[in-house]
Amino acid sequence: MERLLIEGDLEGTYGITARKRRDKSISDVHGHAITRALAAAAFRYGWNLAQFEKALLETPAKGGNHVRNKAHRHGYDKGAKPYLERVWEGAQAFITSHPIIDRQGAVEDLVRLRERIGSLSWRGVSSNTALRLLMAHWEAARKSGGRTYTLSFREAAEIAGCTVGTAYDAVTRRLGGWLRLVHTGGDDKGSTWRLLDGPQDAVEAGGLDAGVVGRLMRLDAFAHRGLGSSSLKIIAALNLEDGQSLVDLADATCMSRATAYRHVRLLEGFGFLQGAGGSWWLTEAARTALQGQVEEFDRVAEQLGTAGTAQRRVDMHKLQRAVWLTETLPRLRERRMPDVQPVRGDEVPAELVRDGLVIDPVTGEVLEDFAVASDGRLILLEPELDYDELVRRAALACAA
């Protein structure tokens, strides 16, 4: 944060690129984002409003350009002062609701976020996939110890148990308000992300243990054409609150009663659920699998034909990375075109060749002046020229 205050946002972390800096409205949004970030850091470090105001207005620090511009355009009393007071109040409210002062506080913050994720409505196939991808990013944040972490799309797909294309679509189209791309990845490093709190208008209608989703979603048993995300959500709902009725499970997992009933019966058939009196409980086999002994889920993957899906995906991603680093990237650096056979204008379509002769597609007549070479190209057949004709053509060429 010291660098942000002194040097400004050199890398465009706060939502602006060099191409957009001439747009005044976007520049104001950028400056406001920097000021808010500095206010949050200053409040967390124990500054007061007067110290924060002095650092931005009375020093040449680039992080204070936005505030100094306000003071220049509207004056201190009507422009800079009320603006800084509003930003400072917002920073106080944010830091008070996010009391992170050490690694333990960061972990507790992530746990609270996981609970919020599980309490929201994730309805439909695309939302189920978005939930898995969001938990993949949450797992990466947990391993890094905070909300800023590094993760590539292929790694996210491996964690969530889906394809790279599905992961890209879910992140770019379904997870707005949850993720912010800080830095784009390079040749051998994933992108840097920031995990956010999600949309403020998100519907709270579910009741899932999102941690269960994060632990089990990469298993082959819950892959496409396996048990799927719906069964995974039912297990997550019962792990949060056991002994729920079918109606309760449908509400907790945000799916129809018919879909909930189908997956409840499926899980019961594999020995993961047991019912009595209209309510359902996780069996001992399911509890054992949730504790990390996933042999029962592996057995189900064998029966459903999805065993090895995760490993095949990992192997494919390794091959793709190797091809990128050894073949594609060197060509890009050398600005070379890929090895593509050029299409020539004298190539004859197969449907116009009969017995080695070229057929006019309009009249159906044989073109006597052309023949087909062994490589499928046209050869123009010219009559042999006598000496006088050759001399005449040479003279015309010299005159031209």
Image: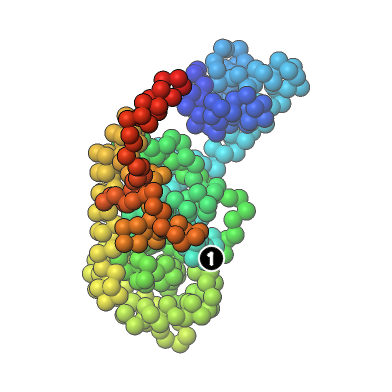
* Residue at x 24% of width, y 39% of height: 326
Q: To which quarter of the image does residue 329 belong?
A: top left
Residue 316 located left or right of residue 165: left
Q: Three-letter amino acid code at disc 1?
A: Arg
Residue 156 rendering spot, x and y as whole percentages: 37, 51
Q: Nearer the viewer, residue 143 or 330?
A: 330
Residue 83 rendering spot, x and y as whole percentages: 69, 27
Q: Is residue 226 visible?
A: yes
Q: Nearer the viewer, residue 344 or 114?
A: 344
Residue 380 rendering spot, x and y as whole percentages: 36, 44
Placement of 236 over or under 345, stated as above or below = below
* Residue at x 55% of width, y 43% of height: 97
Placement of 389 over or under 149, stated as above or below = above
Mark 1 closeness class: few <14, some 14–19, many ≥20 residues within 10 Å: some
* Residue at x 32% of width, y 39% of height: 384
Q: Which residue is mark 1?
A: 123
Secondary structure beneath disc 1? loop
Placement of 136 over or under 144, stated as above or below = below
Residue 266 rendering spot, x and y as whole percentages: 38, 80
Residue 205 located left or right of residue 356: right
